[in-house]
Image (cartoon, helix red, strand yellow):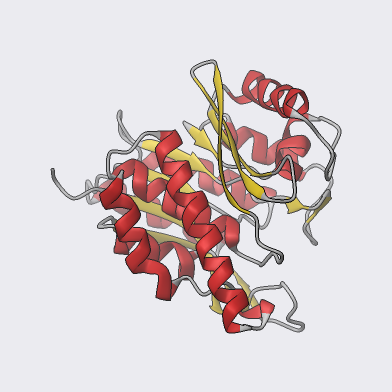
């Protein structure tokens, strides 16, 4: 099998493991040739740090994609993450049109918010722009907050049941026609995972729920899942690998007593990621 390639459209934080500093090593570790279109450069991510620098690269997104198109560069997948503004969403849409080919897989992680709230700096209308990007995707990976914002559905932090999750999935599918991997789903205090909507069927994957949560675990999950898909695994099998690996990384981070601002200690667990792929 020839080596797969992916174009990752994300921001990069100089310190604090998230976005490209997560996606690049994880995709490379599973054999995916990864090219990047940086959307912004930050000194640190914004989760717990104050006074970070931020350099917006919106004006560079489409020219990079056009250069790649002119060089006739081909990609098996395009993977988008955090986009800081409606203008960046529009630039990402244009970039995808420039670099995709007939069989390019489009995966959108629609980063909007968490725990029932949007991230700081987003306009109230931002979900409508992100929805346009999701409508161009083959697979989307929202958390529950993001799915509710995209679908215009009521958000429940906990105490929900499978019927509620099914309602969210069906609303979101009706708007996007994409396959959906809805992350951070938990029906009890022992397990957490994802709900998957694919070809009219709903399924779930779970792993052990850890007592702490950390910044950037969504980046880890989505990057690992895409890497597994490009290695020939089904969406459900890939989501299970991503769920297991994310849980393992959080466990290691808790054991290491790492400052939560520094992100999750995924690097030491990469050998286990390789094992997960070998076993599926």
The answer to whether 22 appears left or right of 4 in the picture is right
Q: Position of residue 123 (x, y in %)?
A: 81, 50
Q: Is residue 26 above or below residue 98?
A: below
The answer to whether 203 appears left or right of 119 in the picture is left
Q: Quadrant of the C terminus?
A: top left
Q: Is residue 115 above or below residue 56?
A: above
Residue 194 sits in quarter: top right
Q: Tell me if I can see residue 34 in this picture.
A: no
Q: Residue at x 32, y 67 (%)?
A: 271
Q: Residue at x 61, y 80 (%)?
A: 262
Q: Residue at x 57, y 29 (%)?
A: 135
Q: Quadrant of the N terminus?
A: top left
Q: Nearer the viewer, residue 24 or 266?
A: 266
Q: Nearer the viewer, residue 205 or 135?
A: 205
Residue most extreme to the front: 190
Q: Position of residue 190 (x, y in %)?
A: 68, 51
Q: Is residue 269 above or below residue 174?
A: below
């Amino acid at each position: 099998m020839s080596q797969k390639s992916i174009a990752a459209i994300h921001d990069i934080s100089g310190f604090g493991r998230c976005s490209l500093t997560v996606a690049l090593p994880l995709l490379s570790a599973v054999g995916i040739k990864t090219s990047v279109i940086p959307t912004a450069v930050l000194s640190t991510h914004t989760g717990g740090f104050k006074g970070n620098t931020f350099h917006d690269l919106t004006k560079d997104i489409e020219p990079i994609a056009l250069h790649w198109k002119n060089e006739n560069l081909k990609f098996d997948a395009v993977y988008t993450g955090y986009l800081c503004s409606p203008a960046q969403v529009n630039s990402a849409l244009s970039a995808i049109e420039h670099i995709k080919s007939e069989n390019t897989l489009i995966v959108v992680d629609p980063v909007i918010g968490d725990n029932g709230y949007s991230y700081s700096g987003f306009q109230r209308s931002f979900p409508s722009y992100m929805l346009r990007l999701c409508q161009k995707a083959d697979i989307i990976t929202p958390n529950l907050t993001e799915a509710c914002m995209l679908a215009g559905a009521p958000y429940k932090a906990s105490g929900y049941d499978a019927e509620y999750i099914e309602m969210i999935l069906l609303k979101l599918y009706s708007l996007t026609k994409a396959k959906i991997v809805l992350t951070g789903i938990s029906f009890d205090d022992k397990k957490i995972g994802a709900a998957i909507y694919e070809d009219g069927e709903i399924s779930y994957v779970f792993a052990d729920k850890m007592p702490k949560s950390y910044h950037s675990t969504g980046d880890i999950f989505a990057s690992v899942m895409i890497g597994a898909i490009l290695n020939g695994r089904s969406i459900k099998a890939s989501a299970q690998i991503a769920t297991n690996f994310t849980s393992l990384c959080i466990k290691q981070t808790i054991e290491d007593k790492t400052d939560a601002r520094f992100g999750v200690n995924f690097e030491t667990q990469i050998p286990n990621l390789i094992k997960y792929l070998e076993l599926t």
